[in-house]
Image: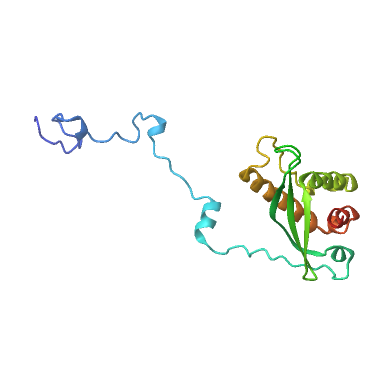
């Protein structure tokens, strides 16, 4: 019975001419574990994410402070920015030159206030705030880095301007620092 199908065995008695025509191995035959089909059950996390039943409510921030509280009285600035810088030349070219930062503080009363400060004055302010508020060191951002080589290059000065502006915003818009004599002395001297 060559080349004839046997009903009892359900297999061909004639050998296949091509390897790719072989029937896939049975489930019980020896198969490496990485060839087996991995069957997953649906986890509760993925089921919840696909169901889209309910989304969490958005976070709502509300200010419940009393307008007459000491913290609110300490706040007097609405915004602060460093708008520009001016390079001041020394007596000899390259010697004694420094940068003055032009700061604008918008007060809650509505009036802008212009302040001109050097980088060294910002550094001194930070040191004095650390001394006055040692518990609040984490709220004082680091100063932008110094550079002897790049100190007058526009790209360096723009990055420093951003860093100093961030520093001033963290100080002036924080009620713990904004009412301090240290900050007032920095701004009004």
Residue at 89% across, 52% down: 182
Image coordinates of residue 107 in percent, x first then y, are: 79, 66
- Exactly how many numbered labels are in the figure? 0
Position of residue 179 in the picture relative to residue 88 (left or right): right
> Residue 187 in the image: x percent, y percent?
83, 56
Front position in the image: 7 or 22: 22
Q: Is residue 132 above or below residue 187?
A: above
Quarter holding the N terminus is top left
* Residue 156 sits in quarter: top right
Quadrant of the image occupied by residue 81: bottom right
Figure quadrant of the C terminus: bottom right
Q: Nearer the viewer, residue 135 or 159?
A: 159
Task: Determine whether, in the image, residue 4 is placed left or right of residue 164.
Answer: left
Q: Position of residue 130 (x, y in %)?
A: 86, 45
Residue lying at 75% horizontally and 47% vertically, measured from the top left: 141
Q: Is residue 120 left or right of residue 50?
A: right
Residue placed at 76% from the left, 45% from the top?
119
Residue 64: % across, % down: 80, 68
Q: Nearer the viewer, residue 70 or 55?
A: 70
Answer with the quarter of the image where residue 176 lies. bottom right
Residue that lies at the very extreme toward the front in this rendered image: 92
| Colour style of the rendered protein structure | rainbow
Residue in the image at 82% along x and 67% along y:
65
**Vertically, is 65 above or below 7?**
below
């Amino acid at each position: 019975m060559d080349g004839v199908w046997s009903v009892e065995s359900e297999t061909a008695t004639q050998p296949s001419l091509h390897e790719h025509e072989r029937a896939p191995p049975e489930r019980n035959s020896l198969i490496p574990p990485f060839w087996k089909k991995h069957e997953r059950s649906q986890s509760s996390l993925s089921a919840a994410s696909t169901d889209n039943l309910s989304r969490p409510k958005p976070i709502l921030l509300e200010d419940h402070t009393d307008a007459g509280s000491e913290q609110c009285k300490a706040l007097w600035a609405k915004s602060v920015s460093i708008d520009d810088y001016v390079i001041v030349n020394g007596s000899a070219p390259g010697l004694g030159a420094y940068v003055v930062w032009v700061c604008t503080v918008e007060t809650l009363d509505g009036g802008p206030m212009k302040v001109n400060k050097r980088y060294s004055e910002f550094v001194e302010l930070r040191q004095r705030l650390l001394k006055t508020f040692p518990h609040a060191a984490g709220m004082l951002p680091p100063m932008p880095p110094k550079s002897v080589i790049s100190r007058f290059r526009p790209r360096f000065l723009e990055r420093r301007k951003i860093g100093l502006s961030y520093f001033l915003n963290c100080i002036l818009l924080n009620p713990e620092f904004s009412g301090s004599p240290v900050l007032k002395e920095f701004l009004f001297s």
